[in-house]
Image (tube, grey):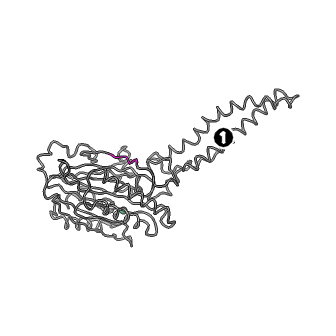
Amino acid sequence: MAALAWGAATDPGRIRQENEDAFVAEPMVFAVADGMGGHQAGEVASALAASTLRDRLSNGATSLDVVVAAVVEANAAIFQTAHTNAAQRGMGTTLTAVAVLPPLDGRPEQLAVVNVGDSRVYLVRGDELTRATVDHSYVQELLATGHITEAEARAHPRRNIVTRALGIEPTVRVDAWLMPVVRGDRYVLCSDGLVDEVDDEKIHAIIRSHPEAQSCADALVTAAVESGGRDNVTVIVVDVVDGIDPAEIAGIPADASDDDTVSLTRTTVISDEPPPTLEQPVIASKHQPTKVQQQLGRQMTLKTFLIALGVAIVAMLVIVFVAAALTDGDDDAPAPSTTVTETTVPETTVTETSEPDTTTTTVRPTTTTSAPTSTSPAGATTSVP
Ligand code: CA
């Protein structure tokens, strides 16, 4: 059993009446979920994520796959609930978690870190604070591509748009990492209510001045509320009391990258679980907007795509028939009756030429929708001329 000490704190903040964050803080699993969706639906989504992880992982996980499977199951549960209850349609949640993998078949004890969305796990090792997870957010994409700075990201008007969340699609991609259990390591899980109010430098200073886990969690939440408290804020602090000597993992780079998105032993796991329902397949699945869905326009569903394709083919056929009739009319004006047999010849060329045309008109909006920088893909609803 891992020798861990932990503390957790949450606060609705100064603006919001309700708290849509949920968390799990149990001996073998720690998680923060930040719900989104109107009329308390966000609370339902985050609570479902938390309860699924509690149910599946409270006795520890046998492998990283088991932890990822629990996240995938939570996604399916939220998606299913959202699609059977009109009031909860469109609800979703972020989920970030640390789970204990007990020793198994000679394998040492390990920690699994998983993430979907823009809640975070920080790792403090020695005197270094690093981010153990990478945000799935619009501003993170702008940051990663050099369009904005870290300071601009924290003040960006669209900083709360996430590009991945649980409950939005039938399947979900989960980032997952395996970490060694290192004595003295401190993991800090938090919702964006902390990071939007308190920068990394101040977070690190508070962590350093609070050696006890619960007082550290309390102090971080208090700092977020006192700095504005514009959002719900949740923090879990997990201290590794006993584990391998930090010197033993000295060879593992703790801060290998220059953009603060550190990956220690990163394995991005792409879930290939069969979707629980196929009601609403989404073509552009990589960047599904959630929090400000209406701003980003509607995703094009397969149904819309097929209808557009059908309409385009029919329109194309009509145009070519008319064109063929006109040219025939010009060429053989005195004998219109013979054109009936002649039109059967150009008809075969119609189907050949129409295919590439319809493909380009319908596919282009789909790729535009998935581009991270496009904020209003209004053309996604491809009205065929
Ligand atoms: Ca939030």
Taking the view exactly as shown, the residue that stands out farthest to the bottom is 17
Side of 205 where 232 appears, left or right: right
Taking the view exactly as shown, the residue that stands out farthest to the front is 105
The residue closer to the viewer here, 91 or 153, is: 91
Q: In this picture, is 368 found above or below 230?
A: above
Q: Is residue 366 magenta?
A: no
Side of 9 where 336 appears, left or right: right
At label 1, counting other C-alpha atoms closer than 10 Å, the crowd grade (few under 14, some 14-19, many 20 or more) is many
The residue at the point 52 percent across, 45 percent down is 366
Taking the view exactly as shown, the residue that stands out farthest to the right is 334
Residue 20 position within the rendered picture, expressed as x and y whole percent measured from the top left: 37, 67
Q: Quadrant of the N terminus?
A: bottom left
Q: Secondary structure at mark 1?
A: helix
Side of 203 where 305 appears, left or right: right
| Residue behind label 1 places its C-beta within 8 angstroms of ligand 1 | no
Q: Main secondary structure of the magenta part?
A: strand
Counting labels gives 1
Residue 149 position within the rendered picture, expressed as x and y whole percent measured from the top left: 33, 49
Q: Quadrant of the C terminus?
A: top right
The three-letter code of the residue at mark 1 reads: Ile
Image quarter of residue 255: top left
Q: Which residues are magenta?
A: 268-272
Side of 360 where 209 appears, left or right: left
Q: In this picture, is 272 found above or below 188?
A: above
The residue at the point 50 percent across, 50 percent down is 282
Residue 240 position within the rendered picture, expressed as x and y whole percent measured from the top left: 16, 57
Residue 209 position within the rendered picture, expressed as x and y whole percent measured from the top left: 16, 62
Name the residue that disc number 1 marks: 313
Ligand 1 lies in which image quarter? bottom left
The residue closer to the viewer here, 242 or 184, is: 242
